[in-house]
Every structure is written in structure tokens, then in C-alpha cells.
Image (cartoon, helix red, strand yellow):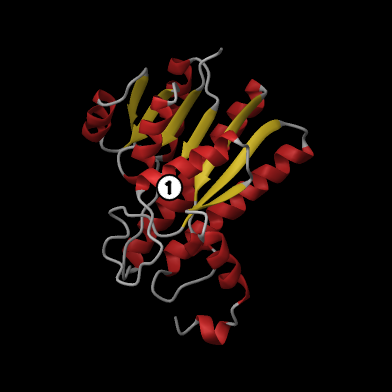
Amino acid sequence: MKQLKAIIIGASSGIGRELAIQLSQKGFEVGLVARRKSLLLELQENLEGTSHVMSFDITDFKNARRKLSELIRIMKSVDYIIINSGIGIPNANWKDEQQILNTNVQGFAVMAQLSFEYFKERGKGCLSGVSSIAGIRGSGVATAYCASKAFISNYLEGLRCRAKKEGLDITVTDIIPGFVDTAMTRNIDYKFWVATSQKAAKQAISALLKKENRAYVPREWTLIAQLMKIIPFFLYSKI
């Protein structure tokens, strides 16, 4: 059986790190991408199978495209590309919001567009992005973050529509986490239904292998998502 290969962009911590560990355990050859090379090398030492490290910042757009293309060439072919890179800054000022938008919007789009074109040329593949339950509605306390996550979901849906329209064998999966116990959520006081990164990654991988269009992780957040979509603004704005 042909060995499957996956690239995880944003593999140095949180869900991305756990995705790399679990995919490696399943026999995948993995490509590890993040800004912090030392964390990637530390992760690589703990993986069971073949892995590759490529360190770059997705907000350095031209270099990021070159580096991702280089990693694909090194791995010879790739079946899955998972874009997990993203940042959230509490009580963000404009400088912070610029950083959020550069990473979660422009950086994401740079990686997603190149990945889609690669799979189109290859003839098949699976592209996945990690958005957030926060992308369903706007937020008065995380304005740019929520908007950026909505962008990710809509961008992925657009690529899914494009694949369907062009008759391409490309699966596009939107992984939509609720609260996951990572560094990004540890300062939030109102958390509930918190999943470990291990649980979130396991459910995300299950969705990828089943070629699902979208997956809420943990799955109980599907209910919260539906409620968030229908709650009237005058109530939602008070949350």
C-alpha cells in the first residue's frame, strides 16, 4: 500500500503538533512547518516515521510560497495539506489586528491557493484549514480574529465550489474547533466543553479520512454552532 503523505502548516504547538504526532502514528510521512524551527526539531525527534522540517513565516508571502513548494518537491508528492497556522490576540489594538489579518487572512490564502493549485496539477488531494467556531458571528471583543476565521471558512468553501465546478478530485475540509486546551484559549475565563488537543486532532483526522466538507471539534459544538447562527442580534450582542 502506498504511504500517505501530509504537510501540517502550524505544526509547532497545539492542534497542529498533535495532528503531526497522530498522523505519524498512522504511518503517514509528514512535513512539519512553523516559524519556530527549534520546536519543529523537538517534535521531529518524537515522531515514529519519516518527517521533514521546513521553517518559515506565512506572512512573508513570497518566501512562504517558495518554501512550501520546496517542501512539496522534497516529499515528491503530498496527499494532504493542513493549514493550522493562526493567531489570536486578546484586546487587540490596530497593530495587533494587522498581525491577525496578515496571518489568518493573507497568510492563509497564500498557503491555500498554492496548495489547491498543486493538487489541481497533481490530479487529486485533500486541502484542509483550521478555522474556528468564532468565525460564525462577529465579536465585540475579538473583532479581527472572528472576521479572519469567517474568511477562512468562506475561502475554503469557495475552493470547494471551484473543485466541484471544474470536476477536480480535490477534497476541501474545514476543521472548526470550539474551545480546545491550547495556549490561545488558556486566558479565556468563560470556557466550556473544552477538548484536549489530542481529542481535537483525532476527530479532525477522522473527518479528513472520511473526506468530510466540514467538521466541528469536539463534535458537540455542532449544536452550539446552530444556536449561534439563529440567536437574535440583541441577545447575541450581550454575550
Q: Which amino acid does label 1 sit on?
A: Ala
Q: How crowded is mark 1: few (under 14 residues within 10 Å), some or many (20 or more)?
A: many
Residue 6: x and y, percent? 47, 27
Name, please, the residue furthest toward the bottom: 234
User: Where is residue 142 shown, x and y percent of the image?
Assistant: 40, 69
Residue at (59% x, 33% y) in the render = 126
Describe the element under mark 1 as helix, strand or loop: helix
Percent x, y of residue 238: 46, 85
Q: In this rendering, would 183 be left or right of 171?
A: left
Q: In this view, does 236 lie above or below 101?
A: below
Quarter occupied by the C terminus: bottom left
Q: Mark 1 points at which residue?
A: 200
x, y percent for residue 1: 56, 12
Name the foreground residue: 108 vs 60.
108
Residue at the far top in the pictured view: 1
**Foreground pick, 210 / 149:** 210
